[in-house]
Image (cartoon, helix red, strand yellow):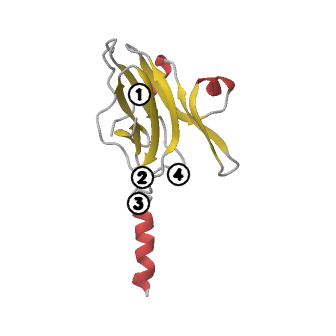
Amino acid sequence: MKRIFILPIIILFVGCASVTPKGELFKIHEDPGASESVVYFYVPEKEFGSTACIIVTVNEEERGCIGNPGYVKVVLSPGEHSFSFRPDAMIDLGVEMRKFTSSFNGGSVYYLESRKVETQEDKYNALQMSYVNIFGGYTVGWVLVPEEEALKKLSILRDW
């Protein structure tokens, strides 16, 4: 009977274990040519309830995984693209979260930070927002961040 009780507890802890990226530290990019856009998605600090890396899907194609904290670099052709995100969990329910579609210009670099949306400026710069109803609720989003601010945060992050 004790073994039956202990097994679910072990499975719970293994499923909730934190995953830290072990890839290379962020390195500054080369400027993209006119035929491509670069988008950095990053999580600068641990997010509540997020223990697995977050799979980034672009136009229904998996393009990388963001650690918690961490980043992923996505190179795109200019134009409109659809994005979705889901945890790389032990049990993949296939639930895509935080979906959005946006257009990107060739020769440009974009920095999107996952963070709480607390100011009018954040709301204006958010390409996507979701309400999280836990402990009083708050809104998170992929917020477009100026390069100088983003590079400071990215400098200590690792890719997957």
Give the Cα separation between the discs numbered 4 and 3.
15 Å
Helix, strand or loop for disc 4: loop
Q: Badge 4: how crowded within 10 Å, few (<14), some, or many (20+)? A: few
Mark 1, residue position: 40
Secondary structure type for disc 2? loop
Question: Type of residue at label 1?
Answer: Tyr
| Sequence-earlier tag: 1 or 3 | 1
Secondary structure beneath label 3: loop
Q: Nearer the viewer, mark 1 or mark 4?
A: 1
Q: Which residue is mark 4?
A: 49
Cα–Cα span, label 1 and label 2:
22 Å
At label 3, the amino acid type is Ile
> What secondary structure is marked by label 1?
strand
Say which amino acid is labelled 4.
Answer: Gly
Q: Which residue is mark 3?
A: 91
Residue 151 visible, this angle: no
Q: Residues within 10 Å of mark 3 (few under 14, many from 20)?
A: few
Tell me the CA gap for discs 4 and 2. 10 Å
Say whether disc 3 or disc 2 marks the residue closer to the N-terminus. 2
